[in-house]
Amino acid sequence: MTMSDSQLLRVLWIGIAVIVFAILLVLFYLVERKVRRMRHRQQVKEAVELFSAKSSALDDYLRSGDRTRKLNAPGSGEGLRREALEEALLDRLNVGASETEKQRIFDFAGSYFAEEYKYLLNRRRWSDRMNVLLHIEKFHIVSLKDQLIARLEKLDPDQKNDDERFLLIRTLSSLQIEETFDYLELAAERFSELQLMQVLRPIKGELAQRLIREFDQLPVRIQRCELDTLRLGNVRTTEVLDLLERCMNSEDTETRIRAIKALANFGYMNEAAADRLESRMAEGDAVIWPERMMYARLAGAVREERFAPYLEQMMADRSYEVRREAAASLSNYRGGLERIRQVAENHPDRFAKDMAIEILERRAYERQVV
C-alpha cells in the first residue's frame, strides 16, 4: 500500500516539526545552563569580594592567625562557599602573600579542603582529577600524600596519556615528599625533558641534597635534567661544583655538555678541572662541535690566560657557532680585543678573519649604544 502525496507531505512536516522542536529544546537547555553558570559565577565573585575585604573573617585569620567560627562554619550554599574561599585564598597567594600568610593559607586549606580533595582525586571525570591536583600543589596539602600515591599506583601502566601521572609525580615533588624518588625511573621513561624539569625544579632542601649525593644512581635523562636545573636555579655550592667538575669526565656526551654549560655559570673551577678543560680544547676537531662550543664558553667565563691561545685557534673552527663563541669569549679577556684585531688583520683563515671583524664591529656598536 503506497502513501498518497498528501500523506507523504504530512509525514514530512511532522518530521521537520520534531527536528525543530528538538533543536529548540537543546538551545533552551544550553541557554538555561549558561544563565545558571553566569549566575553561579556572579555569586562566587561576590563571595570572593566579601572574603577578600578588609576586616573579613579570612583577612582577620591571615593577619592574626585566629580562626573564628564564622570562617569555619559550613552554613548554607557550602559548595559555593568552598569555591569562593578557594579563589580568595589563591588570589592572596598570587599577589605576594608573606611567608607567614602562606603558611596560614596552607594550614587552613589542609583542614578545610582535604576531605573534598580526597573525594575529587577519585572522581571519574578526568578534568576534576586534574584540577584538584593543581589545587593540592598550590595549597601544599601534604596530608594527602597517601591518597596521591594510591592514585598513582592505580593508573594503568599501558595508558598512553601521561598527563595525570605527570601531575601526580610533580605534586609529590612540590610537596617535598621523599617517595618522589621511587618514581624518577618511571618519569625518565615516560616524560619529556620539559616535564622532567618541572618535576625536578620544585625539589628543595634535604631532597635536593639527596639528588646531588645519589646523582650517579639516577637515570641518565634525570641526570641531564638535574644539571640543567642546577644551572637555571643558579645553585652555587661546593657540592654542586664538585658534581659539575666530575661530570666533565662523563662517558655520556650530552651530560658532559650540560655540565660544562652549568660550570660556565659558576665562572671558576679548580685546577684539575682547568687542566681537563685545556686538554680537551687542545684536541680540536676530535671533539664534536657542540662540546667545543661549550668549552669556548667556559674558557670565556673563567678567563685564565692559558686558554686564550686556544680560543684564538678556535676562531678558525669549521663550525660558525664555535667561531662565534670563541671570539665572544676571547673579547672578555684582558687584551682580548687587540688579539682579535690581530686575527682580523693577519690570520690566514678567511673564516677567522670574518669572525674577528664581526665581533669587533659588534663591540664598537655596543660602545656607541651605551
Image: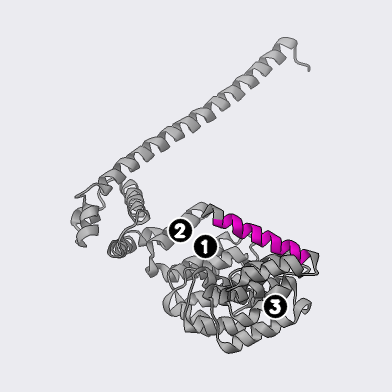
Q: Give 263 or 69, whichever is nearer the viewer.
A: 263
Q: Position of residue 311 (x, y in %)?
A: 68, 74
| Whether residue 304 can be seen here | yes
Q: Give 269 or 13, whichever is nearer the viewer.
A: 269
Graded by Cα atoms within 10 Å as few (under 14), some (14 to 19) or many (20 or more), the crowding at tag 1 reads many
- In space, the residues marked 1 and 3 are separated at their CA atoms by 47 Å
- In space, the residues marked 3 and 2 are separated at their CA atoms by 50 Å
Q: Earlier in the sequence, mark 1 or mark 2?
A: 2
For disc 3, the marked residue is: 310
For disc 1, the marked residue is: 167
Q: Identify the amino acid type marked 3.
A: Tyr
Say which mark, if any, is on residue 7.
none
Element marked by disc 2: helix
Task: Kindly check if marks 3 and 2 are in contact, taking CB atoms under 8 A apart as contact.
Answer: no
Graded by Cα atoms within 10 Å as few (under 14), some (14 to 19) or many (20 or more), the crowding at tag 3 reads some
Element marked by disc 3: helix
Locate residue 134 relative to residue 5 in the image: left or right: left
Q: Position of residue 111 (x, y in %)?
A: 31, 63
Q: Residue at x 24, y 46 (%)?
A: 53
Q: Residue at x 73, y 82 (%)?
A: 282
For disc 2, the marked residue is: 134
Q: From the viewer's perspective, is the residue at label 1 or at label 3 nearer?
A: 3
Locate residue 346 relative to residue 295 in the image: left or right: right
State which quadrant residue 348 falls in. Answer: bottom right
Q: Position of residue 286 (x, y in %)?
A: 78, 79
Q: Give 342 or 118, whichever is nearer the viewer.
A: 342
Q: Identify the amino acid type marked 2.
A: Leu
- In space, the residues marked 1 and 2 are separated at their CA atoms by 8 Å
The residues colored magenta run 351-367
Q: Residue at x 35, y 51 (%)?
A: 91
